[in-house]
Amino acid sequence: MENSTFDAASLKILSELQQNSRISTNELAEKVGMSATPCWRRQKELEEKGVITRYAAIVDRRKVELSQCCMLHISLTRHDATVVAGFENAMQLRPEVMECYEVTGNSDYMVKLVVRDMNAYHDFLHNVLLKLPGVSQVNTSVALREVKYETALPLA
């Protein structure tokens, strides 16, 4: 397994684990057409190389009362290292920030935020985001409904 080249067995293992990370080694081996020990070794190698970064349970956000999903397009007034580092660090520390990307286009960052309701969004906006040095503009789109939500990467 060199850098970004993966053989068919590794891709099958990754695909299966994305669908069910709790699958037993024996079940995984059967699904990918390997014996258990080589399959287990390959999975461990994928973990050690950082291809598999962690295992997680996928929780339905609405069932835990996190009904509001917002996409924020954020512009900074300046892009010096201190402002950028401060903004990015703040985003990494906030649990309601699900994803944060530096982007091209009309804004500098796109942030996916999941909160209980619009009051929680308001609190985040005014008590966190707009208090960060260098934040000049925030344009928010509120998701009306979820059409597709996928966590598995398209490996094949």
Image (spheres, rainbow, N blue to C red):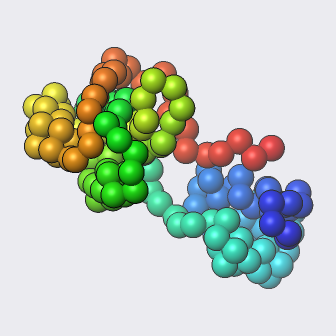
Q: Position of residue 10 (x, y in %)?
A: 81, 63
**71 lies left or right of 103:** left
Relative side of 38 to 99, left or right: right
Instruction: Give above or below for 125 relative to 153.
Output: above
Q: Residue 27: in sight, yes or no?
A: no
Picture layout, residue 124 above or below residue 9: above
Q: Residue at x 85, y 74 (%)?
A: 35
Foreground of the two, 4 or 132: 132
Q: Quadrant of residue 1?
A: bottom right
**Front in this rendered view, residue 25 or 41:** 41
Q: Is residue 138 visible?
A: yes
Q: Position of residue 42 (x, y in %)?
A: 78, 74
Residue 156 pos. (x, y %): 80, 44
Q: Where does the image place residue 63, in percent across and percent down from the top left? A: 28, 40
Identify whether 58 is placed above or below 137.
Answer: below
Please state the total of marks drawn on the protein image: 0
Image point (61%, 46%), residue name: 152
Along the line of sight, which residue is nearer the eye, 84 or 53? Answer: 84
Quick one: which residue is furthest to the top in this view? 144
Q: Residue at 32% x, 46% y: name it.
A: 97
Q: Please say if 25 is above or below 85.
A: below
